[in-house]
Amino acid sequence: MEKSAEVIVARKDRVKDQIEQCKESVGDDSMGVEHREVDGYQLDLFQVQEEPSHHGVPGDAGSGTGACEVVQASAASEPGRALTDRLMEEVCSPENLNRAYKRVKANKGAPGIDGLGVGELLEWLETHKGVLLRSLLDGNYQPQPVRGVRIPKPGGAGMRQLGIPTVVDRLVQQAIAQVLEPILDPTFSEFSFGFRPRRSAHQALQQASAYVKAGLGIVVDIDLEKYFDRVNHDILMARLARHVVDKRLLRIIRRFLQAGMMQDGICINRSEGTPQGGPLSPLLANLLLDDFDKELERRGHRFCRYADDCNIYVGSQAAGERVLASVTRFLEKKLKLRVNQKKSAVARTAKRKFLGYRILPGGRLGIAPASLKRMKGKVQRITRRNRGVRLERVIEELNTFLPGWVAYFRYAEGKTALRRTDEWIRRKLRCYRLKQWKRPRTIWKRLVKAGVSRREAANLASSGKGWWRKAETPVLHIALPNGWFEAKGLVNLTQHYLLLNH
């Protein structure tokens, strides 16, 4: 109850602050709300009446503050589009904001520090839409601190820091990202694949495979230490100012970067980093590393970059060592980033992983052992013998992620590995079922009912072997054959893999 009260008070204070910021220059909210439901979305939420007025740069003595003119978003290809001081009007256009609302709603996500959920966003907007628009157009919008969340990194390699913005801040970030992406993305390198429209991890892998086929079998694997947490704000904003001249938009983006992080009840100020969790962070992260991409292109290097995961392909170990030393100096001096020397390496491609794969001689793709290990770890967590849930429920949980996992690795030469993994998963499930039967008498009865001879059933039921060893015995294979799991609907990795590659 105390927590709920705190959330309510925080929401009221937040709204009050936003109103006070805009009251003097804007006045009361006079924008009407018009909307209609289609497939659960508000299509006309931001439809507004035109209010003829002049809008100047905030802070300019002659500006007409409080203007609410909203213009339609222009085509992404319009010459000089970014070099206008009215880009914020595009951010606040009804079409753009409605699209941003749909995206935020579809992405769901946890609430920020104010406790406002995605399901409550519509109600909030119906009341405070006008205030929100005016604060954006006047450049007075103040983002809230993000909610700090730590999640484990894959493979147990420490914790990853996330920053969850409030749902209103996510809406604003999404609206900004939708306008900036068509401006910035065409300027990015063709060898950058992460967090970009119409580009994927598989395309990056295909490009890397082509390099290895061409004889570049040594990879310079560069690991940027806590990249998203170490982005230099001044350098990033300088890069952004090359493309955007609207001071209001630049000011709000910097405020998003500098918004504090609420962690364990304490608000921590941030002077660097663009925390993962907001819609705008991936685009800004790509913008900063684009300088790195352009430098690699200028030097004639062959490379692939997916977010902060960058691999450079060379012909020899000696060349790789020189490249690693050179690019480390560039990253640390020019971009103020830190290269993790322990995790970065120069090695044959088959010895390193890239996006979960490893690149074998001749450019062939294989499943990286670490990826297979990570998947098995998840299977182990689902099939813990002390969970106390039905086996059918366990199979359902496995089926929620196994097809997607196989689909991602469909380009790998992994038939043998997948067949062995199928056998291992079935053994885990046999072990789970055996543990459920628990008592020797129950085990004996179940085995006999499944068609096992009374003598063999008695031998297994009274055996002193552990559950895992019992699960491998021929007796249990008779009681729970492969066809039994197929009838239960368990995804067969090998069959799914062959179907995808048919």
Image: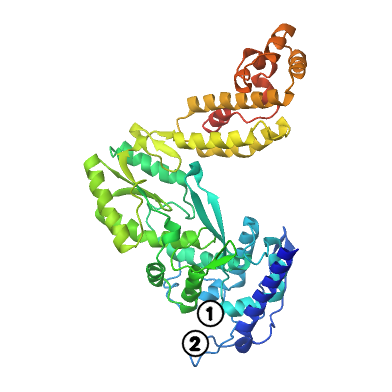
Q: Name the amino acid type tagged 2.
A: Gly
Q: Are marks 2 and 1 in contact (CB under 8 Å)?
A: yes
Residue 451 shows in the view: yes
Residue drawn at (51%, 74%) of the image: 252
Q: Disc 2 versus disc 1: distance between alpha carbons? A: 9 Å
Can you tell which quarter of the image residue 113 is in?
Answer: bottom right
Residue drawn at (60%, 64%) of the image: 265
Image position of 55 with respect to 395: above or below: below
Disc nearer the start of the sequence (2/1): 2
Relative to 424, 411 lies left or right: left
* Mark 1 burial class by Cα count in 10 Å: few <14, some 14-19, many 20+: many
Residue drawn at (71%, 61%) of the image: 119
Toward the top, the furthest residue is: 455
The residue labelled by disc 1 is: 139
Image position of 434 with respect to 256: above or below: above
Image position of 19 with respect to 171: above or below: below
The residue labelled by disc 2 is: 59
- Secondary element under disc 2, as helix, strand or loop, is loop
* Mark 2 burial class by Cα count in 10 Å: few <14, some 14-19, many 20+: few
- Secondary element under disc 1, as helix, strand or loop, is loop
Residue drawn at (73%, 68%) of the image: 5
